[in-house]
Amino acid sequence: MNPILTVRGVHTAYDTVDVLTGVDLDVLPGQISCILGVNGAGKSTLIRSILRLTPPRIGTITFNGNNLHKLKTHEVVRLGIGCIPEGRRIFGRMTVEENLRVGAYTERSNAKIRSSLERVFHIFPRLKEREKQVAGTLSGGEQAMVSIGRGLMTDPDMLIIDEPSLGLSPLFVQENFNVIREIAKAGVTVLLVEQNVNQTLAIADYGYVLLQGQVIVKGSADYLRSNPEVQRAYFGGLN
Ligand SMILES: Nc1ncnc2c1ncn2[C@@H]1O[C@H](COP(=O)(O)OP(=O)(O)O)[C@@H](O)[C@H]1O
Ligand SMILES: [Mg+2]
């Protein structure tokens, strides 16, 4: 199986500060791949590199066979990469439908927006039932569906989700993971960034552990669950 996303030898810096120093990564289509690592490891910088919000200084990133070099972020999105950035939340006073429409703000064609909405409602029938309900009154699990459904409004082949469980209550966190599993079942490739190791490895197929801007260990979720390097990355790897 050919990867849908390949990252090769990527170095990314902010001004003079080198953050990523030679990252390689492959995401296989249809899988849930995860990027694990402590705060400051460079996870969001890797996502920013893929989306070309902070373009790499060196290295190559390809998606569906297209070299992303020279593309603008909206062109990367148009190729089929959706993203739910860190800390993205729903708009509590807007309806479910209005929240979802925000995700399609770059799309002008009403017919396309309608078909994207129908696709999201097909994956999450509960949202169809609550279409006109104000989002702030939904249950935690339903709010997770809205947040992820919004990321699906550009009809991406691959969805990048950066720390969806950050700052959420434990019940809400589990709902989020359930929802991510649902979208993978619907055929969307997922690249999931998380600090929540055990819950992430429970739904992921494959993972990479980042530490200080480098991949220190990678492998199947089963392999990573029992790998002492993963523990090292989280507890005491910074020495
Ligand atoms: N805009 C920025 N300017 C300068 N340094 C940054 C910026 N964003 C992040 N960094 C630094 O890059 C490193 C990696 O950050 P980040 O990619 O956000 O890590 P993670 O997502 O794994 O927590 C950190 O040391 C952080 O301080
Ligand atoms: Mg981050």
Image: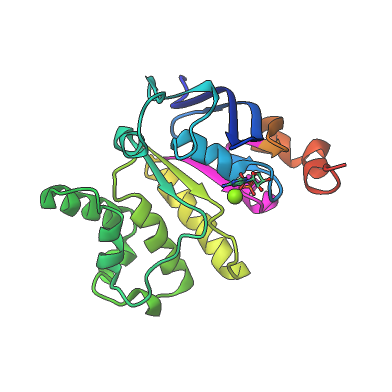
Which colouring convention does the figure follow? rainbow
Check if residue 172 falls in the magenta segment.
Answer: no
Looking at this view, name the residue that lies furthest to the front. Answer: 16
Query: Where's the C terminus, which quadrant?
Result: top right
* Residue 43 spot, x, y in % from top left: 61, 42
Q: Residue at x 58, y 25 (%)?
A: 10
* Residue 128 spot, x, y in % from top left: 26, 65
Q: Residue at x 50, y 40 (%)?
A: 48
* Horizontal side of residue 210 vs 118, given as left or right: right
* Horizontal side of residue 207 vs 151, given as left or right: right
* Residue 95 spot, x, y in % from top left: 28, 72
Q: Which residues are magenta?
A: 189-208
* Horizontal side of residue 218 vs 184, given as left or right: right
Looking at this view, name the residue that lies furthest to the bottom. Answer: 137
Asked which quadrant contains residue 149, the reply is: bottom left
Q: Nearer the viewer, residue 92 or 212?
A: 212
Q: Residue at x 67, y 30 (%)?
A: 219
* Residue 8 spot, x, y in % from top left: 56, 21
Q: Residue at x 64, y 41 (%)?
A: 42
